[in-house]
Amino acid sequence: MEKPLVYFLCTGNSCRSQIADGFLNTLGADKYEVKSAGLEAHGLNPRAVQVMREAGVDISNHTSNVIDPDTLNRAAYVITLCGHADEHCPVISNKNVIKWHWGFDDPAKATGTEEEIITQFRQVRDSIKARIEKFVQEGK
């Protein structure tokens, strides 16, 4: 049986959507097909790779992708992770799609020392992981 596709969307597909993609692939690959994309492709953020490696998930081979209309329209779930993507998500022709917005702060906008910035990345990572765990357990 085909697994439902979860499509995580963000503005640049560099941090939050990549983290969500990595966690759902790790925690729910048996239940879901997972993809992520952005309104634009900003490249994979090295700090996102670092904090995910700390959590035992390797996303270093991920690519930053622009939203693909075909993927969007075959998704069972479209989940936006930032307000900009939520507001500017392309029209989805699939009327059966479940569209949710899970808003998380953008760690790429963190300022301060390197340690303060990495702390922001870790906090967002941990928040996304908790949300993914709930989704895998409860399907919502």
Image: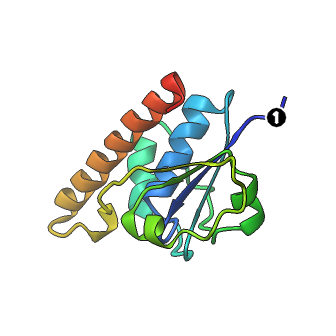
Locate residue 72: give its quadrant: bottom right
User: Which residue is painted at 54% across and 29% down in the image?
Assistant: 139
Q: Position of residue 37 (x, y in %)?
A: 59, 63
61 relative position to 45: left or right: right
12 relative to 2, above or below:
below
Using the image as rendered, state which of residue 55 and residue 109 is in the foreground: 109
Q: Amino acid at mark 1?
A: Glu
Q: Residues within 10 Å of mark 1 (few under 14, many from 20)?
A: few
The residue that mark 1 highlights is: 2
Q: Residue furthest top?
A: 137
On the image, the x and y values in percent for residue 38 come to 55, 68
Q: In the displayed image of the protein, which residue is found farthest to the front?
A: 95
Q: Nearer the viewer, residue 130 or 74?
A: 74
The residue sitting at 19% across, 70% down in the picture is: 111
Residue 67, given in percent of the width and then of the height, sits at: 64, 68
Q: In the figure, residue 115 lies in which quadrant?
A: bottom left
Quarter of the rendering occupied by the N terminus = top right
**Image-based side of 87 in relation to 106, left or right:** right
Using residue 36 as the reference point, say whether residue 134 is left or right of it: left
Rendering quarter of residue 48:
bottom left
Question: Is residue 55 visible from the viewing direction of this image?
Answer: no
Q: Residue at x 59, y 67 (%)?
A: 64
Q: Position of residue 129 (x, y in %)?
A: 41, 38
Q: Is residue 49 above or below residue 109?
A: above
Q: What colour scheme was applied to this rendering of the protein? A: rainbow
Left or right, 35 with reference to 27: right
